[in-house]
Amino acid sequence: MEATSVKKIIMKYKFDYFKTLFMQTVSESMSIVLAFIFGLLIQGAANKDYNLLKISIILSFVILVFNPYLEYVYNVMIGRLNQKILYEIRQSILDKYMYSNVDEFRKTDNGSKLSVLTNDTDILNSDFLANIFIIWHYGFMLIATIISLICISVYMAAALIILTLISFYFSTKGVGDIDTVNEKRLKALSNHTDAMNEFLNGYDVIHDFKIQDHSHRTMKRLFENTISRYMDYKKLISKQQSIGMFFGGIVFMGGFIFGSALVYYSLLSIGMLITCIQLSNNLNQPIFNLVGLYAQFKASKNTIEKIDSILSKSTSEKNYRTNKDTTYVDGEKSSPHHRDLNEINNNVSYGEDRNLKIDILNSTDRIKDRSIGNYDLKLDEVSYSYPNSDFKLGPISDCVNFGKKICILGHSGSGKSTILKLLKKDIGYDDGNMYIGGDDYKSKGVEEILDYIGVIPQNVFVFKSSVKNNITLFDKSIGYEKIIDSMKKAGLDDFIEKMDDPNLIEELGGSISGGERQRISIARCLVRNKPIIVADEAFSSLDNNLAFEIESEMLNLKDNTFINITHRLFPKNLSKYDEIWILKKGKLIARGHYSNIENEEHLKEFIKNLK
């Protein structure tokens, strides 16, 4: 995905801007014309000129009737254009997040991402996008007014222009560093959104451990800080507006006094004085408003730079998802590494009604004919070492033929997660070679590898939608029979009749059990023809009976390779695996069928420790 920017997105709609600004200009011109008509009306009354009076009244009513319609049209055009631009900016930001690699995605927390997509884009809309047309409005009125005044009286125009320039100069001085104040406001908003996201997701912990008071105090402190930072920003804006109002009044009164003097010396008619006074409002208002708009425009610079820093990142597919910039402890991250959306294509858009829709590019069609069975995995002296760590995996050599069932055992820090990362191509191996279906791993991109490999994570993410949508991940090309077959194989028979219920699964899967979420994850792999299914500590949080039942079902799958990466095992199932690997500190210390290694000391020790 190419890098972009707020400016590039706006420039895509330059023709729409031209049409909207043209319509706005026509509407604004009416107020200038109306000022002249009012002057003629007064002049006609003063001179008792009936024809001039009649024409002035008719033209006034025509403009007063026609101008509101013009204003309605261009306001609708402005609203539509700003929403189109705002949508594309938000969609571009979201795409940057969705298409980024794993490490890049996790550099910022979800609360900060939500703040950019909501708070920052809202500020961009109110302080920048909307103000483009307001500034054009006042700018046009200012220029048109000056030209009109020059046509009426050079003396009157010179006086009002000088007063205007003096007012603008003093209005923009001595207000304070609005950039710094606005940056603090944005930071406070981001912290507040981040905390709300965290507390809502952590409701169970907050409730169960009775820390509501702490949460309340924290949110209150963050909210008060947000209000305080907003008020600092508002005070600066209001100060500039107040100064602008004062000097706007100076322009109005100064013009009125000077114009009266010109009338006194017969250098200006009474009608043209009324026209000048009417036009002076078009100098007064811009002075009053442009000062505040100038401050908001200046403040929006921080927001644009923040959004551009995200949009400017290139997210084109790389051979491997990550590099070696991450620090690990004993070869493992401190928290389990799970990627809940491995099975889906990262094309995100808003779905129908209230559900999020994930558009799938028919990855089922990208898998080779399953009858070929060309999905063997081969590791040839593969090794990997983490930077800033003494841990090293391997060298490991083995061949996992298609359809085989493999159990990889090991305690925390043994290298199990590293093997998973290598299989998913989250990282690239240092030495040796890996093959899938006889093809070199390095010859395949990440997306192609994920067409072969499906992962069942420990914590399965489900969408607030139907069971069917959570299994197919909103891919309407998957047939009904395929869905039913996958659900039966995954043990979801009880959900078949109600799989289309859009309200069945609540937010974060609160309405279904952990085992049911695991079965949905299995069905996702099966329905998308994943020939290789890897369980990443998938059963560790389930009770013994349920974990044993699901593991047994996976071992009975005939058309899939099953790799169970775990530190938890059930002796009754061990003999069902074609091969067991035992890892310790990155070394493959034992492997083979259970009947061949059941007397292996490391396996005995492992089973004993689990008991």
Image (cartoon, grey):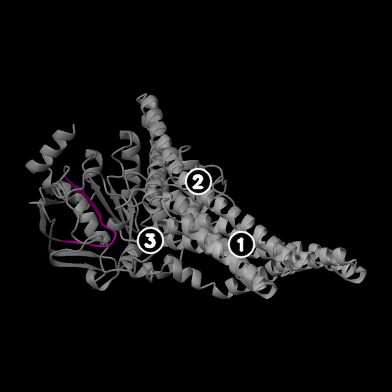
Q: Front-most of 163 and 267?
A: 267
Rate crowding at label 1 as few (under 14), some (14 to 19) or many (20 or more) other CA atoms within 10 Å. Answer: many
> Within the magenta stretch, is there residue 545?
no
Residue 305 is marked as: 3
Nearer the observer, 287 or 6: 287
Q: Give, as a single range, the part of the protein colored magenta.
A: 398-410
Horizontal and vertical percent position of residue 521:
39, 49
Pointer 2: residues within 10 angstroms few (<14), some, or many (20+)?
many
On the rendered structure, is 603 left or right of 427? left
Q: Which mark is residue 92?
A: none
Q: Residue 407 colored magenta?
A: yes
* In contact (CB < 8 Å): disc 3 and disc 1: no
Could you tell me the amino acid type at mark 1? Answer: Leu
Name the image quarter holding residue 198.
Answer: top left
Which residue corresponds to mark 1? 283
Residue at point 14%, 39% (across, down): 606
Residue 206, x across and y down, in percent: 37, 29
Where does the image place residue 308, in percent across and percent down from the top left? Answer: 39, 63
Q: Would residue 607 be visible to someone looking at this image?
A: yes
